[in-house]
Every structure is written in C-alpha cells, then in structure tokens.
Amino acid sequence: MGTKGRGSVVVDRNNLNLPEYCESTYDVHFDELKAANYYWGLFPKDLVSVCVVTTAGADGVIKLANIHCARLRDNSGILLFANMSHYVVDGIGFCAFISRWAEHCRQACCDGVKPVVEHRVFHFDRNIVHKALSLDRRPTSAAASDLFFVPRFAASALAWISPALRGRIMSVVASMGKPEAHMFHISKERLEALRCSLSDYVPSDIRLSDNDLIASLASMTIVNGIKSAAISSCNGGILSRLMSVCSSIFGDLFAKTENEHLTFVIADIRHRLGICDSGYTGNCVIPQLVVNSLQRMESPITPESHAHVASRVRAAVQDLDGPYISQFVDTLNRFPSSFAQPLVYTINHPEKVFITNQSRFPLYDLNFGFGTPTSMVHLTAAKHVIFYLKYSDKMGITYACCDTSSHTGYTYANYFRLGADFSNIRYVVKIAGGTVT
C-alpha cells in the first residue's frame, strides 16, 4: 500500500500466497436440497468462509482466492463456494479462473482419451486499458465528479490504512445491518411483456435493455419499500439511531443531498474500449451513476413512472463512450484514494442501490467432470445490492435484493407485485423459509 492509498498486488515466487482451500462433509442429501428448492437455510452455516469484504485469513494475509468444497451425504453432490478478491479481478476475471479450473478438473476425470485443454493467455497488465483509451476527453458527470474526485478526509484515511485493517473495519460495518436476500425470478416472456407495457412512454428510437428494466424497477421498489417501512416503524433501534447520527455527521462533510436518489449501475467497459479479446481479467468496470429525484422514485410504480426511470438508466449507460471513460480513468489515476470515496459517501444516501448484471457470465456452463451446476447463488452481505444472473438453462433471470429485515422484505414483495400488475409478471420471493408470490 502506497503513501497515497494506491494499492498493488505483488507476486513473490519465493513466498507464494497460496489460495485458501478447505473441504468438509455435510449430513444432508442432494435430493433433500433439491426438494427444498435449494433453500439457503439448509446449507452449512460455515459454507461461506469469507464475508463480502476482503479480510485477512488466520495467517494475517488476505488471500486472492478462498475455496470451500462441502461434500453431501452418500456422495450425492457437492456444494462449492468460491471467492476471489476484487483487488485483483472483476466478474470476468473470476469466471475465467473458475472456467479454467473446471477445464483441468474435467480433463483429469477422463479415463480414456483426455480432452485437450486449449491454451489461453490471461493478462493483468493495466497498460492494456491505458493503450485502448481514446485520444479525446469528455468531462465526467457532475455526480461522478463529486462522488469520486472531491477529496474528503474520511475517505482518504480509509484508503491510506492497510487493506487488512480496512477489511476488518468494513466487515464490522457490513455485519451491523444483518441483511437478508430476497430472490426473484422473471421468465424471458414476462420480461418482454414488461418492456412492451412501457413502449407508449418511451421514444420509438430507444429500446430498453433487460438491465434498464430491472435496474429501474428494483430501484423504485426499494425506495418505496424504505418509505413504507419508515412509516410503519416510527421508533428505530440503536443501530438506526447510530446510522442516523453518522448520516448527519457525514452530511455536514459531504453537503448532504436529501432530495436525490443514486443508482449505481456497474458497467463493464471492455467492449467500449475494444479489448474484449485481449484476455484482460483485471478490474475493468465503472460504476455509472443514475441520479433521480427522491420524489420521483417514491411515486407509485406505474408504466409511465417506470418508463421515465428506465429511460434515465439507458441514457446514463449510453453516456459511457470512449472520451468519457478516458477522462474517468485519467482522473482516477490522479486520485488513487478515490476508490474509498463511495464507501464513505454512500452512508449519506440510505436509499442508494447498486446494480450488477451477471446474466452473461457462463456460470451454468461450468463442468468439473460430473455435469453442470443445478443451482447458482451469488452471495452478498451489502444492503440494497441488486445482482442478477441467467437462471440455469432456462430463458429467464434470477435476481436478489438485499435488505436488513424480513419486514421490509415483505414490503418489497408487495411493491414488486403491485409494480408488476400492469404486465402480469409473477414474482416469487423466499424469505426466512417462507415464500411470497
């Protein structure tokens, strides 16, 4: 860690930091999990060996990869937990590692003629990104500039401390909320019906993507859920009061904007820079900010209001062109501690939402030699994070929103149902062993 908060990953061939790998057995049969629709409450409590924030292991060192294999009763199946540090890779890099691992395992399982594992080269050289930047520059948005590039003492202090200490601090903060995940599934047909229902309120030359539809609907649902929960819960607990005090303190430091809502859309920039075939597996994502008025987000979810917010998501994503990305990367390099800015700044925005689209990741194509996965779950412990991925081999999307209470989760379920009535979409939410449809 440098003196200005710039971190680096060093590979010492004489002292390799090997991944953490552990195995265990679990006295539950695969058929029992399948019959329960892979209900998370039946999974081993210690399956997740690390939390959402990167922390040091027992030896005091942050591992670049953490793997836990839990073998089910009668050798009926395996639960595989895999985590890689975001310091090193993004989702594309994670999938590249897991896919490569699966290829070698599949080859080792063959008794006869072993399949040839195709030679591929992966790169972590950041110069690949820098060489692909546009020669032109265009100013970043006002929201992005304020969030990332306005120096703030709290963020700088968080960036300057060691990654291990920062991990301990952030893991404590993350665990205070005790978030719960609420799962939803939308078929491809229903998603298309939702898109058609908004067509009267969207210009004919704009086609809303699946990402636009879900990001906007989920964001509006969360804001409405928070509003309803606040109305029904007049007196918060100790944690609520503590967060309120922190928000007030940081609000003074950050010029709190109570009337704005931020949706962070995590965007991969490889195809925008033309480096999809370069084999670059390092971090290559930009959090694009979508700013809406809080009043707009709290309004009833109708085709018109949904179309308005979805159109703003589309406009924000389309704004990520070469000159914009080049300016963002240049500025990011001038302020190496800027990565910590959102960690502190977002405390001031309790209604914030993070959207990450993993539906194109080939996770359901993984084959370690005994078939492809039957169920895939993305684990997170961060409040108001929406992630979604392709649902098995079916044409549909599964996504989850994370909150801090089942009460608010049921509120979300109600709003998702109300918000989707106009297109007859059916949502299924699993909360604490129960199912809301």
Image (cartoon, helix red, strand yellow):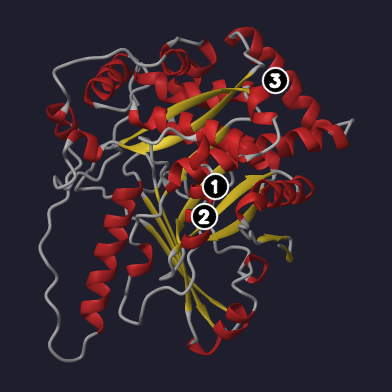
Res. 197 mark = 1
Mark 2: few/some/many CA within 10 Å (<14, 14-19, 20+): some
* Residue at image point 28% right, 19% down: 333
- Furthest residue toward right: 235
The residue lying at 25 percent from left, 77 percent from top is 106
Q: Are marks 3 and 2 in contact (CB under 8 Å)?
A: no
> Disc 1 residue type?
Ser
Q: Quadrant of the C terminus?
A: bottom right
Local SS, label 1: helix
For mark 2, what is the residue?
Answer: 193
Residue that appears at 19% across and 34% down:
273
Q: Which tag, 3 or 2, sits closer to the chain's start?
A: 2
The answer to whether residue 365 is above or below residue 402 is below
Q: CA distance from mark 2 to mark 1?
A: 6 Å
Residue 47 or 292: which is nearer the viewer? 292
Q: Is residue 93 left or right of residue 42?
A: left
